[in-house]
């Protein structure tokens, strides 16, 4: 195995949560270009590609050496499958004669796929053959699922998890209201996925992203690196 890695940026023109969030100008350039530039600066990534319905200046693509993949209309809708979008891009790249066995996916609505973290993640995956993937996460204990509620009978709230599940998981019930009740809680923060090609194609791992496999390593990032998915977050940038 060559451990050759490519990078795919998934960028869509429209979005439901925040209008044209991928195109928001951050420090003088579109949000989606930040992660792409980080990937381009990595010496461990052989090529960088973008799958999108956005028209990007060809001069920029040539200058930066970014492969452009025109995303078909059925993969540009709000309910389009991310798995099929990535798979379509991988097939397009293979048709160009580019060989790879690791695919890095960076999202267009985040800015945290730093070169140093991409390289760390790649090395971790390459050096540990048991890993199926390595993903970026941040620790958010304040959002511990033990504190989550869901609507009940229209106007009431109940525990997100069934009471018996909570009681089984928590040994010290007197301490159940603390944010550390389930120890540290990590969330995918939208920066990157680094996946073995064979794992991705099997698509049989843990939900919700089954293409990440079952043995998932991680790179812990600063909590400030989050993907934009709600209007209030625009003010943070």
Image (tube, grey):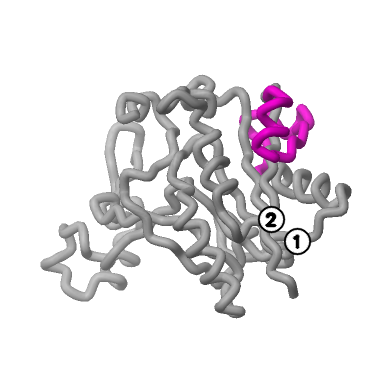
Task: Tell me the element at label 2.
Answer: strand
Residue 154 higher or lower than 126, as above or below: above
Quadrant of the image occupied by residue 63: top right
Task: Tell me the element at label 1.
Answer: loop
Q: Residue at x 57, y 70 (%)?
A: 125
Percent position of residue 13, x then y? 62, 24
Q: Which residue is mark 2?
A: 46
Image position of 157 (left or right of 11)? left
Q: Residues within 10 Å of mark 1 (few under 14, many from 20)?
A: many
Inter-mark Cα distance, 2 to 1: 9 Å
Magenta extent: 56-82
Work out which quarter of the rendered image holds the N terminus and state it.
Answer: bottom right
Work out which quarter of the rendered image holds the C terminus and state it.
Answer: top left
Front residue of this view, candidates 154 and 167: 167
> Quick check: is 108 in the magenta stretch?
no
Residue 221 higher or lower than 228, as above or below: below
Front residue of this view, candidates 108 and 181: 108
Residue 182 higher or lower than 106, as above or below: below
Give the mark nearer the N terminus: 2 vs 1. Answer: 2
Q: Residue at x 37, y 45 (%)?
A: 225
Q: Which residue is mark 1?
A: 100
Q: How many marks?
A: 2
Image position of 220 (left or right of 167)? right
């Amino acid at each position: 195995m060559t451990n050759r890695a490519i990078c795919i940026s998934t960028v869509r023109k429209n979005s439901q949560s925040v209008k044209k969030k991928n195109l928001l100008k951050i420090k003088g350039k579109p949000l989606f270009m930040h992660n792409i530039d980080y990937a381009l600066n990595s010496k461990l990534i052989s090529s960088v590609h973008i799958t999108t319905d956005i028209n990007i200046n060809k001069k920029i693509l040539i200058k930066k050496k970014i492969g452009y993949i025109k995303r078909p209309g059925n993969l540009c809708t709000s309910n389009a499958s991310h798995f099929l979008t990535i798979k379509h891009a991988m097939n397009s790249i293979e048709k160009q004669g580019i060989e790879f066995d690791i695919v890095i996916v960076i999202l267009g609505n985040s800015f945290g796929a730093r070169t140093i973290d991409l390289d760390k993640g790649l090395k971790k995956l390459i050096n540990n053959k048991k890993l199926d993937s390595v993903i970026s996460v941040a620790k958010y204990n304040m959002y511990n699922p033990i504190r989550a509620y869901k609507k009940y009978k229209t106007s009431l709230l109940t525990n997100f998890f069934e009471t018996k599940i909570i009681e089984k998981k928590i040994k010290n019930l007197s301490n159940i209201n603390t944010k550390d009740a389930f120890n540290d809680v990590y969330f995918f923060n939208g920066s990157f996925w680094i996946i073995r090609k064979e794992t991705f194609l099997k698509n049989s791992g843990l939900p919700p992203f089954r293409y990440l496999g079952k043995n998932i390593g991680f790179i812990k990032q600063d909590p400030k690196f989050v993907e934009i998915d709600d209007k209030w977050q625009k003010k943070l940038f």
